[in-house]
Amino acid sequence: MSALTKKHPTGLRVLLLGFLVVWVILAAFPFLWTLWGSFKVEGDFFSKANWANALTGELTRTETGGSFTGDGYHGAWVQEEFWRAALNTFVVCFCVVLISLTCSTLAGYALSRSTYNYAFWLLIAALIFRAMPPITLVSGYLLPFFEWNLWGHISTTVIVLVAINQPFSLWMLTSFFRNIPKDLDESAMVDGCTRFQAFRHVIIPVMWPGVITTGLFSFLLAYNDFAVTAMLLEKENQTMVPKIASFLGTTQTKGNVMFAVAAVVSSTAPIFVMVMFFQRQIVSGLTAGAVKG
């Protein structure tokens, strides 16, 4: 009997494999079901007579002549101009990630190398600020935005999202920097580098997975936000999540629910692709932040 078999009995391995399969099915089912239903008509996917109509597509064949239809995607992206919301989301996420990472990387490095007590209290203040509900922070911005005629613009939303996300990014990157030995900085400066050159050419390449991990979390915060974007953006400047909510708010109009279903699939797919593409960097970054170097 091999050492592997002694360490992991066959029954335990089968149990773990079965649990993993069930977990994957349960986790993937909502998205796969929504993906399938996005190619049906509303009468099939939300059938009250027989749920199996969502599988067979009886009304879909009657109305469109085929078992599948792309009317939901056409209605969302072309008729309701969901592409504008997608473009606005990209602009917001890009600006939030760029500003958050730039500020948090510089500040996190400075705080991680600081020997003064104020660094600790700054991090505590940032943690308290992050613990506050975002909706309470938004209300503080409304009055100056209205007085200065800034309400409804994408730039104002970027400012608020950066302010909300900054404490989280600062904590993560400070933790990553602290796990990098100070000897690297000192060795680089002994070789003739300035503090910034040591930071740029030595420290950043070492903790690049941590930057990617923090950037991805910053991206997800801006990408999935509803409260801030719904309150601060006009209808013409909506991002994807508030736009999807607007489809669901007009369920009395036939087809709008399917627009929402198609939009949900369209907004979820890029996240799935991004996580799969950066999975190695995410794992490396989380591991680097969890284990003391």
Image (tube, grey):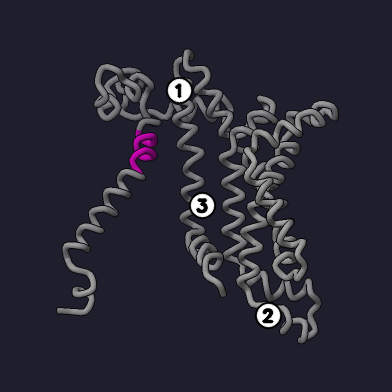
- The quadrant in which residue 258 appears is top left
Is residue 84 something that shows in the picture? no
Drawn side of residue 253 relative to residue 54, left or right = right
Three-letter residue code for mark 3:
Met
Residues at badges 3 and 1 in contact (C-beta under 8 Å)?
no
Mark 2, mark 1: which one is toward the viewer?
Answer: 2
Secondary element under disc 2, as helix, strand or loop, is: helix
Q: Which mark is residue 257?
A: 1
Q: Report which residue position mark 3 lands on.
A: 274
Three-letter residue code for mark 1:
Val
**Residue at 76% over, 34% down:** 141
N-terminal of the pair, mark 3 or mark 1, is: 1
Q: Which residues are magenta?
A: 28-36
Drawn side of residue 192 relative to residue 162, left or right = right
* Coordinates of residue 93 in the picture (x, y in percent): 64, 45
Drawn side of residue 214 relative to residue 261, left or right = right
Q: Report which residue position mark 2 lands on.
A: 184
Mark 2 residue crowding within 10 angstroms, few (<14) / some (14–19) / many (20+): some
N-terminal of the pair, mark 2 or mark 3, is: 2
- 114 w.r.t. 35: above or below: below
Mark 3 residue crowding within 10 angstroms, few (<14) / some (14–19) / many (20+): few
N-terminal of the pair, mark 2 or mark 1, is: 2
Q: Is residue 123 magenta?
A: no
Is residue 29 something that shows in the picture? yes
Three-letter residue code for mark 2:
Leu
Q: Is residue 32 magenta?
A: yes
- 291 w.r.t. 151: above or below: below
